[in-house]
Every structure is written in C-alpha cells, then in structure tokens.
Image (tube, grey):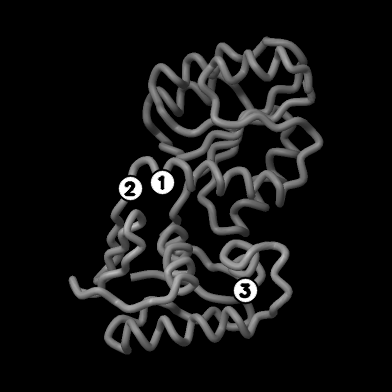
Amino acid sequence: MLLSRLMIFNQNEEECRQMEAYFEESGYGVVCCLDADELMDMISKGRHKPEVFLFYIDDSGRKGYDIIDKIRAVSDMAIIVISKDSRLDTQLYAYSKKIDDYMTEPVPLPLLEAHVEAVLRRFSEKRLSVETAGAITIDYESRKIYLEGKVLKVTAKEFDLMEYFIKHKGMILSRDKILDSVWGYDYIGGYRSVDTLVKKLRAKLTKEYPYIQTVYGVGYCFDV
C-alpha cells in the first residue's frame, strides 16, 4: 500500500518522467501530467486525489497561477511550486494563492523529496494527533504507543522510529533513508543503529504482530 500520492505538472516531458521514476522508486504513487486541460479534468472529476501537487511554472511572472486558483476551488491538497523565477514579488504572489512551498530551480530531486516529506508531515500533524495501524495506536501529542490498548514502554528514539514507520506505512525504506530521517543527516553512526532499534521494537511488538518486515539488501517495510 502506498502512503502518499503525488501529482506532477511539468510540460517538459523528459523532466516529468524523470521525476515520476524517482518518486516511484522512493515508494510514492505518482501521476505525471503534461497538459493543463488534462490536469484540470483529472482534478475536477476526482480521478486522482493526490496529497501533494508539484507544479512547475516555466515562464517568469504570474502567468499560470490561474491553474492554482482552479485547484484551490476544489481541493485542499498541498501545493509546491517550482519555478526559475526567484524574484521576491513573484514568490509573495505565489504564496497569496495559498500554496504551501516555493522552490527555485535548479532543484535536486533529493531536496525536492525532503520538501515533499516536510509538507506531508505538516499536513499529517494538522489532521491527526492519534493514528492507528493494526493493533498499534500512536498518540503524537503525548508521545505514547499502545499495543492492543496497553501502553508500550519505549525510548524517545524508539518512538521516533515507530512514528516514521507508521507515517510511511507500506513503503520500502532503505537504511540510509531511515538513518537520515530518524537520526539526522549529521549522525555519524551506521546501519547497526537502525538494525538494533528495529530488533528492540520487534521484541516489544512480539511475534504476534510482525509488522516490521525486513527487505533483504535494502532495509525495512512496515505494514499491517
């Protein structure tokens, strides 16, 4: 199961397909759209319901923002604008259209993915303070984890790891990605830190709830 769906609007087909391949490899569901009329048709008819919309604006200035107005009339999805226009007045105008983020090209795809995850995290925090996955209930405000209604005694880092797994349920997560997201980019430890913490969480979940699965040669996948 894919946790997050992205819709990409980029009239440069080669760039759009490269982004599509990158995000699909990261575990996202992706719809790539090259035509504005097709885009609005898909959104208005509810054919796709993405959590995040990546909107490439090729020309400088304010041309093209009417599309965002139309999207906002029917959807509250997160919108990230990517543009070559770095002028302050253009960025302020974009934010006045109720977008969620603005990035100036060139944008490396790993950085774009980090912005997508940050937007998703903000949206998730707004919508959910308590989340359930199988027999697990996680309370983000009190930072408590429940298994079949009983509180699990976990460390702060174990909570962070479980939170990351639940927010990326069904996605194959490499050890590198887990290290960067849970421990931080400046952490000097290695994969053993991930494996050790996963082992501890598995023990607390018991064999009755084998939600954390090993993906050999890659990392882990949490699913119920």
Quadrant showing the N terminus: bottom left
Q: Nearer the viewer, residue 153 or 32?
A: 153
CA gap between label 3 and label 1 equals 23 Å
Q: Nearer the viewer, residue 157 or 224?
A: 157
- Residue hosting label 2: 128
Report the disc number at residue 108: none
In the displayed structure, 92 sits above or below 185; it is: above
Mark 3 secondary-structure assignment? helix
Judge the density around disc 1: few (<14), some (14-19), many (≥20) Cα neighbours within 10 Å.
few
Report the disc number at residue 124: 1
Q: Amino acid at mark 2?
A: Leu
In the displayed structure, 194 sits above or below 62; it is: below
Mark 2 secondary-structure assignment? loop
Q: Position of residue 156 (x, y in %)?
A: 45, 70
In the displayed structure, 43 sits above or below 224; it is: above
Residue that appears at 25% across and 74% down: 151
Residue that appears at 69% across and 78% down: 189
The quarter of the picture where residue 106 lies is: top right
- Residue hosting label 3: 175
Judge the density around disc 2: few (<14), some (14-19), many (≥20) Cα neighbours within 10 Å.
few
Q: Earlier in the sequence, mark 3 or mark 1?
A: 1
Residue that appears at 20% across and 75% down: 150
Q: How many marks?
A: 3
CA gap between label 2 and label 1 equals 6 Å
Q: Amino acid at mark 1?
A: Ser
Q: Earlier in the sequence, mark 3 or mark 2?
A: 2
